[in-house]
């Protein structure tokens, strides 16, 4: 089954009752039925096998002629990532065992459920978490961080650059991890003084730009039409100290969780980031279990999401109800977009004994 949508909620004016915050009893019942259905679906059908990806010993080739963008928000370190448009243009030359690049192009879709889960582009809620991290002054020093459903990996990269002790990147698709997340981590391992500054848009708050037109990638690409985005110089990265702190996994959460739990010592994360991952209610049981098993006592899950994902059905209200029913986490809103934005950042933490 494929969905042809880009999570654009701006066209919708009337939210369905289930996401409008109206908790009437009958709607709660309807919600319960949905979850019963969700559990059935999640245990059926083929499951994408998880695997660990070791960064290549000679990563230079990943960055040869790489064309990248930089997001700079406040005092956060600049975060570099491969330019999506150029990435797409060179797609046919890339190794893509999963064939998601061609599939995505063919179906003209940002998400093909169970095949490609959207990791090839940076979704706007990622910028909301970055803005929040800037506001909260989170240092990450000495912390273990999981970027769950990482895509380009900007949140994990921020933690890495800010002194996290360990960062684990997970994405559904191995192509995303190998062709995008790993190269992005390499890009950021290079010293900033190696960045050719010509044409680079330092100081640009990309999240804000997205708020304005909802389509920052295209807007920015147009404005760059006459000045090609900058390229990275290639240096020996294979022994970079930041890389030793990173682990990369692909696969479905249902197989990722048992695989990652086999690590010795078993990992627990002080911070889990997960941005734009609650669009499909079928995935809630596996997502919740992953958070439950991998969050350290006292740890925090920062979850960023749109209110509702039209065309797929998930959204914050349904996820909040699900979390409440499970009774494991408390959930608090940290940021709710001003009227019209309908985006949110929430934090989950284990319920304290007095809350149980
Ligand atoms: C819309 S993308 C968001 C990517 C990135 N977090 C961002 O904000 O730019 C959703 C991500 O969730 C992950 N994901 C969704 N469903 C998943 C599942 N069932 N198992 C594992 N990962 C899943 C995929 O890795 C995918 O990249």
Image (cartoon, grey):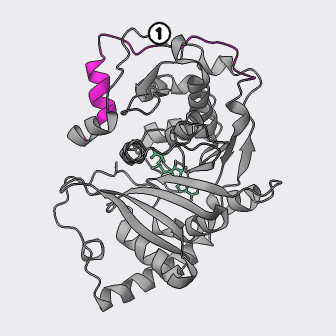
Point out the stretch of residues depicted in magenta: 214-239
Residue 182's image quarter?
top right
Give the labeled residue for mark 1.
196
Q: Residue at x 44, y 85 (%)?
A: 33
Let me know if residue 356 appears in the view: no
Above or below for 142 versus 295: above
Q: Position of residue 95 (x, y in %)?
A: 64, 29
Q: Position of residue 47 (x, y in %)?
A: 66, 61
Mark 1 residue crowding within 10 angstroms, few (<14) / some (14–19) / many (20+): few
Q: Main secondary structure of the magenta part?
A: loop
Residue 175's image quarter?
top right
Above or below for 309 versus 177: below
Q: Residue at x 63, y 48 (%)?
A: 143
Query: Is 231 colored magenta in this rendering?
Result: yes
Residue 246's image quarter?
top right
Query: Is 142 colored magenta in this rendering?
Result: no
Q: Regarding mark 1 in the picture, which secondary structure is present there?
A: loop
Above or below for 269 versus 159: below
Q: Position of residue 295 (x, y in %)?
A: 62, 62
Q: Position of residue 249 (x, y in %)?
A: 68, 46
Let me know if residue 231 appears in the view: yes
Q: Nearer the viewer, residue 236 or 300?
A: 300
Quarter containing the C terminus: bottom right
Q: Nearer the viewer, residue 177 or 195?
A: 195
For residue 16, side relative to residue 54 (left or right): left
Q: Residue at x 70, y 52 (%)?
A: 50
Q: Nearer the viewer, residue 125 or 163?
A: 163
């Amino acid at each position: 089954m494929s969905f042809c949508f880009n999570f654009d909620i701006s066209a919708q004016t009337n939210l369905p009752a289930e996401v409008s915050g109206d908790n009437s009893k009958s709607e709660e019942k309807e919600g319960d039925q949905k979850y019963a259905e969700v559990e059935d679906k999640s245990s059926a059908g083929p499951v994408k096998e998880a695997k660990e990806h070791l960064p290549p010993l000679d990563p230079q080739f990943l960055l040869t002629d790489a064309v990248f963008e930089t997001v700079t928000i406040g005092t956060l370190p600049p975060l570099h990532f491969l330019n999506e448009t150029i990435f797409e243009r060179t797609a046919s030359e890339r190794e893509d065992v999963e064939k998601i690049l061609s599939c995505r192009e063919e179906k003209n879709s940002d998400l093909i459920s169970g095949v490609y889960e959207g990791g090839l582009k940076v979704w706007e809620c990622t910028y909301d978490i970055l803005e929040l991290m800037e506001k909260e002054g989170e240092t990450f020093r000495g912390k273990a961080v999981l970027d769950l459903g990482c895509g380009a990996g900007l949140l994990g990269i921020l933690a890495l650059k800010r002194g996290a002790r360990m960062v684990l990147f997970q994405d559904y698709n191995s192509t995303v991890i190998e062709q995008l997340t790993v190269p992005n981590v390499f890009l950021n391992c290079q010293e900033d003084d190696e960045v050719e500054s010509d044409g680079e848009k330092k100081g640009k708050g990309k999240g804000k730009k997205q708020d304005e037109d909802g389509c920052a990638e295209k807007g920015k690409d147009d404005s760059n039409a006459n000045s090609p985005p900058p390229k990275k110089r290639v240096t020996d990265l294979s022994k970079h100290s930041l890389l030793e702190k990173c682990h990369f996994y692909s696969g479905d959460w249902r197989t990722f969780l048992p695989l990652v739990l086999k690590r010795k010592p078993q990992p627990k994360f002080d911070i889990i980031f997960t941005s734009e991952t609650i669009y499909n209610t079928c995935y809630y049981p596996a997502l919740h279990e992953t958070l439950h098993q991998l969050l350290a006592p006292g740890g925090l899950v920062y979850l960023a999401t749109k209110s509702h994902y039209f065309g797929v059905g998930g959204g914050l209200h349904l996820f909040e109800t699900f979390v409440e029913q499970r009774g494991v986490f408390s959930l608090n809103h940290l940021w709710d977009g001003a009227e019209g934005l309908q985006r949110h950042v929430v934090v989950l933490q284990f319920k304290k004994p007095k809350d149980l």
